Image: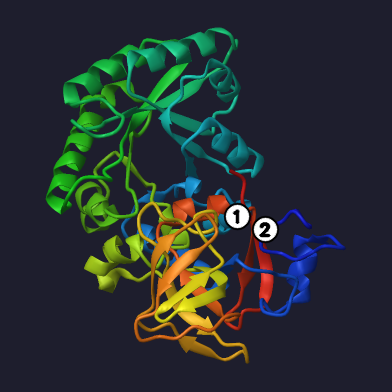
Amino acid sequence: MTLDSYTKGTWLPYEELTDDELGAAEHSLFDGPFTWPVMVARKSALLANVATMAEYTTRHGVLFAPHGKTTMSPELFAEQLAAGAWGITVATANQALAAHRFKVPRIIIANEVLDEKVLRWAATRPDLLFYVDSRAGVEVAAAALAAVPGGKLSVLVELGRAGGRTGCRGLAEGVELARYAAEVPGLTVAGVAGYEGGLPDTAAVSEWLRELAALADAIADLVPGTPIVSAGGSAWFDAVVDVLAPDGKPLPDRTIILRSGAYVSHDDGLYARVTPFVRHPEEGSLAGALEVWAQVLSAPEPGLAVLGAGRRDVPFDQDLPVPLRVRALDGTLREAGAARVVKLDDQHAYVDLGDSTMAVGELVCLGISHPCTAFDKWRAVPVVDDEHRVVDVLNTHF
């Protein structure tokens, strides 16, 4: 991709640079062609996170199709696939098309697809799976197949829960839908899937997972080959492997696919609190890889600093960003101490300084919470080494 005067976080008023040119120059973030705010990704943390989950899924005997909606970055998809990921999960048809263009070998759309033109396209691509949770979804798939001679589609019957998001409400409904789908010529029921996020604790997640496994057992006669059982957000993947692959041994005659996605960049907020590695530190650890650097624009009264980054630059749907470090005007770094962001406007962050200090013009490194709403705010994300030299660029396609 070409970086130019339209690329947020860069300062290129007179020239254009390709990703390769910018990475090869190895500019410092602080004296290169950048301006504030800018979000960067630390390479060492990204690679360590990818390796940690690759080792975890291998150790537990499950396949991995990390959710790509977190980053929609072909560079990160390539890293995940190179580390052994079976495929990539997406949420929408547009994301599936992008993943296909990124040459992802297997794609799961973790939703029902009700757009017939999308399914006509999918009917010629055997590397794609999608969910069904209603007869209406099966009927759209049937109409698409009728329009594509020789076309084939593969679906996963989605199990939900009362009061939850999408998915069949209960075992009987899932079995009935699977049998209805299996009657459609060209439509293959490949297994079952669902999302346990939103359940309150390990016990509730485990109970739901046992129902998911029971649904797979109940429709196994409809599935050619080994039924897929897929689950796993970023908060409960330990429960998924405990129930579906106890002691590193997947349920007999089942293919277990984990779909956790936020791990690749992790964060300094939501997932730092809820990752299963907090409960099981012996299994590994993840590090927050994203940093948003913002300048102190004003220190208008004692105890308050105002930064030039706001809702357009950092996620705020789960937690406000976390001040981590301050770069002084002389280039030295210090910890941000007790400083905390207490409010965001569109382009401003209000920082309660506590016992910390921030001077006008200094730079503040903000950790983020919930990476799924961070990447979509940035078209290009410089990748930095541990000395903040820019060595690469991540592109996002939302």
Residue that carries the numbered disc 2 in the rendered image: 8
Q: Residue at x 57, y 81 (%)?
A: 362
**Is residue 282 positioned above or below 53 on the image?**
below
Relative depth, front residue between 354 and 365: 354
Q: Residue furthest right?
A: 14
Instruction: Label 1: state its secondary structure.
Output: loop
Q: Quadrant of the C terminus?
A: top right
> What amino acid is found at the position of numbered circle 2 in the picture?
Lys
Instruction: Label 2: state its secondary structure.
Output: loop
Residue that carries the numbered disc 1 in the rendered image: 378
**Is residue 275 positioned above or below 384 on the image?**
above
Circle 1/circle 2 CB separation < 8 Å: yes
Relative depth, front residue between 223 and 174: 174
Horizontal and vertical percent for residue 359? 53, 84
> What amino acid is found at the position of numbered circle 1 in the picture?
Trp
Q: Tell me: 296 left or right of 174.
A: right
Horizontal and vertical percent for residue 122? 56, 25
**Is residue 265 positioned above or below 230 on the image?**
below
Q: Tell me: 282 left or right of 201.
A: right
Q: Earlier in the sequence, mark 1 or mark 2?
A: 2
Horizontal and vertical percent for residue 220? 27, 27
